[in-house]
Image (cartoon, grey):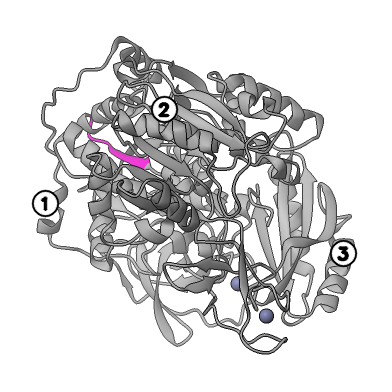
């Protein structure tokens, strides 16, 4: 018989093979493809254009692994259509570097064996009522949003929900936005359930990946805590998906195969016909819109754990306080911080800029350091003793000959966390400090640092936005935002939403154990209303206003955006090509084609970049019409098109 087999490659259709084996849809097989043997899956439809003279090859063998569920196949087909990704590439996300795992000794699953122990955790009345609203007894698709203030105990509510699901024999998936979170989170999980969950992200070993993949496919592993990619595991009996911190923009995969893991999780739940819970303190604008429309149900936790109150806010107007040169912390701020330190409060200085200084310039020849591969300034990292491009990883030493003879004489413009850390150390020489950024916290000793922070052995933290992500530091009761700069808001359609999320999450780190806490905003901004709006206790007010602005301007979530980025080696050729491409697709697409414009980062990794934007109705027709016409356009050599459906970054 003939069978359609999808391969994990760039093709958007299955290939036809023949086989005497008893094969059904979803079976994993090994087949010859060109000169190599690859793993494929018996797909649900045949390839459309098969030439008669084509020699059909034979399936080599069937892999002994439970077949992929039809619902999952439907999901992958839809995923591919929605995100405009070849079906084969969607399949690749599911297969472990292109392979399936065949039989594995069951002793490997032992470590994840479920063994739910009784815990002493008792839900509050509010938590119980949220749990009831989640309505998990009905095992059908529905989206529920659990919206709760930071530190209100949302996790315990969905853990309870998950427990019921596991007890019924189903598998559960908890999606988290950051790998960095899984450590503290895993402990919380073990404390509640009494057994170890499988943790899945790009950083785990190959061996562990194999064990978890096959444990999931065989229904031997019941719970996975994972980053984006765990959404593509071959669950045999998935019963519940939880998306924690659903508003987090890192759910969007921007490079390579682009998709939004939160949205795809909702669609996977829909195809599997199972419930999904979105967890957040402040919903994303899309989720907020769906709550308003009644598409998603919602439950709310307004009280913080132990009745802790939310931090207070204070604005420190830098226009009235003269800062000394090369200094970024005002005298007034220092007084406030001293007051907190005396009370044994932990203090965080927040600045969302890695390294020492974002801009290095020679005062003799006036040339700055910029990346040779990207149109971006290099950031000086004093601790690493080099200048770094945060986009392509280019590195160079701070050592240059001047065009005015001799060595360059550098000025460092503006601070990064390393520079603030130096200033903090000067002001508080007797306090232990640590920098909390992706440069310092992704290493092996980060567990050690975390422990010291939790036990208040480190009194002052200097952190980037990494610290806003769900960490629980019991003594943190004072946050200083070194410079709240909201001026960039106009350039990014999601600017206001991003700021709302950032400052809400950030202040949520403070005052978690009941002591009074304050967030101080240093600012040059004379209009402080924006800060007051952002920090309002009821974020729904801000979201309501923001949604209105989006509606009036025909922006998402009211319209669909698809970004098209064309890259090439030659500036002028690229521009010509972009205009040619635009006129080619313009009349065929179900939507308006805007642009082309030079991308804000015009040169990235040695390639020039221009952007087009399609604005259309929220219907697959936009994607389908675009896919059809793109297929017919032949790009000149060296030019490449990237499609980003529902873009979040407009770099
Ligand atoms: Zn670069
Ligand atoms: Zn110079």
Question: Tag 1 or tag 2, which sits nearer the N-term?
Answer: 1
Compare residues 150 and 127 and report the one nearer the observer. 150
Residue linked to disc 2: 150
Residue linked to disc 3: 584
Name the mark nearer the viewer: 2 or 1. Answer: 2
The numbered disc on residue 286 is none
Cα distance between the residues tagged 3 and 2: 49 Å
Dividing the picture into quarters, in which one does residue 211 lie? bottom left
Q: Residue 284's x, y, as percent?
A: 57, 33
Q: Is residue 469 visible?
A: no
- Against 389, residue 590 (above or below) is above
Dividing the picture into quarters, in which one does residue 403 lie? bottom right
Q: Residues within 10 Å of mark 1 (few under 14, many from 20)?
A: few
Query: Quarter for ligand 2?
Result: bottom right
Compare residues 66 and 635 and report the one nearer the observer. 635
Cα distance between the residues tagged 3 and 1: 58 Å
Q: Is residue 207 visible?
A: yes
Query: Which segment did they paint magenta?
Result: 168-174
Q: Quadrant of the N terminus?
A: bottom left
Q: Residues within 10 Å of mark 2 (few under 14, many from 20)?
A: many
Residue linked to disc 1: 110
Q: Residue 516's x, y, as percent?
A: 37, 21
At mark 2, the secondary structure is loop
Classify residue 254 as left or right of residue 125.
right
Question: Tag 2 or tag 3, which sits nearer the N-term?
Answer: 2
- Against 366, residue 140 (above or below) is above
């Amino acid at each position: 018989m003939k069978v359609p087999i999808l391969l994990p490659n760039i093709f958007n259709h299955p290939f036809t093979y023949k086989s005497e084996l008893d094969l059904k849809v979803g079976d994993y097989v090994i087949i010859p493809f060109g000169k190599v043997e690859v793993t494929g899956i018996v797909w649900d439809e045949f390839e459309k254009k098969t030439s008669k003279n084509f020699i059909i090859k034979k399936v080599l063998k069937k892999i002994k692994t439970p077949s992929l569920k039809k619902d999952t196949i439907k999901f992958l087909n839809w995923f591919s259509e929605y995100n405009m990704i070849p079906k084969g590439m969607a399949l690749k996300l599911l297969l472990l570097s292109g392979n399936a795992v065949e039989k594995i000794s069951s002793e490997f699953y032992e470590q994840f064996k479920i063994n739910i122990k009784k815990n002493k955790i008792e839900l509050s009345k509010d938590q119980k009522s949220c749990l009831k609203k989640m309505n998990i007894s009905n095992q059908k698709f529905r989206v529920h949003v659990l919206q709760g203030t930071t530190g209100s105990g949302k996790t315990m509510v969905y853990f309870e929900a998950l427990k019921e699901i596991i007890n019924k024999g189903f598998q559960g998936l908890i999606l988290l936005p950051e790998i960095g979170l899984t450590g503290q989170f895993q402990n919380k999980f073990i404390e509640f359930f009494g057994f170890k969950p499988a943790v899945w992200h790009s950083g785990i070993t190959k061996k562990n990946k194999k064990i978890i993949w096959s444990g999931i496919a065989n229904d031997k592993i019941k719970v996975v805590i994972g980053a984006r990619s765990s959404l593509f595991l071959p669950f045999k009996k998935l019963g519940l998906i939880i998306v924690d911190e659903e508003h987090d923009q890192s759910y969007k995969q921007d490079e390579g195969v682009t998709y939004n893991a939160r949205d795809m999780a909702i669609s996977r739940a829909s195809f599997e016909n199972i419930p999904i819970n979105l967890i957040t303190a402040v919903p994303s604008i899309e989720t907020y819109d769906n709550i308003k429309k009644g598409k998603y149900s919602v439950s709310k936790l307004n009280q913080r754990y132990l009745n802790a109150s939310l931090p207070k806010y204070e604005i420190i107007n830098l226009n009235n306080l003269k800062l000394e040169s090369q200094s970024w912390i005002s005298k007034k701020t220092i007084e406030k911080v001293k007051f907190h330190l005396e009370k044994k409060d932990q203090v965080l200085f927040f600045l969302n800029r890695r390294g020492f200084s974002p801009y290095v310039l020679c005062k003799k020849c006036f040339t700055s350091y910029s990346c040779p591969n990207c149109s971006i300034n290099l950031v000086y990292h004093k601790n690493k003793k080099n200048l770094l491009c945060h986009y392509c990883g280019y590195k160079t030493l701070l050592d240059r000959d001047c065009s005015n003879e001799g060595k360059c004489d550098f000025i460092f413009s503006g601070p990064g966390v390393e520079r603030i850390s130096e200033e903090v150390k000067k002001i508080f020489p007797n306090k232990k400090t640590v920098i909390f950024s992706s440069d310092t916290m992704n290493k092996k000793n980060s567990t050690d640092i975390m422990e010291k922070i939790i036990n208040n052995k480190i009194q002052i933290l200097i952190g980037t936005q990494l610290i806003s992500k769900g960490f629980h530091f019991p003594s943190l009761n004072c946050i200083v935002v070194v410079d709240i700069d909201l001026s960039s808001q106009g350039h990014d359609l999601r600017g206001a939403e991003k700021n709302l999320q950032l400052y809400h999450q950030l202040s949520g780190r403070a005052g978690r154990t009941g002591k009074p806490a304050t967030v101080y905003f240093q600012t040059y901004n004379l209009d402080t209303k924006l800060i007051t709006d952002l920090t309002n206790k009821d974020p729904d007010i801000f979201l309501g206003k923001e949604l209105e602005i989006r509606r009036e301007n025909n922006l998402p979530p009211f319209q669909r955006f698809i970004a098209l980025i064309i890259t090439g080696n030659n500036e002028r050729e690229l521009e010509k090509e972009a205009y040619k491409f635009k006129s080619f697709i313009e009349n065929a697409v179900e939507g308006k084609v805007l642009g082309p414009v030079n991308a804000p980062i015009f040169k990235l990794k040695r390639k020039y970049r221009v952007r087009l934007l399609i604005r259309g109705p929220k219907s697959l027709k936009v994607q389908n019409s675009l896919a059809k016409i793109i297929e017919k356009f032949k790009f000149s050599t060296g030019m490449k098109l990237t499609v980003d459906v529902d873009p979040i970054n407009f770099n």
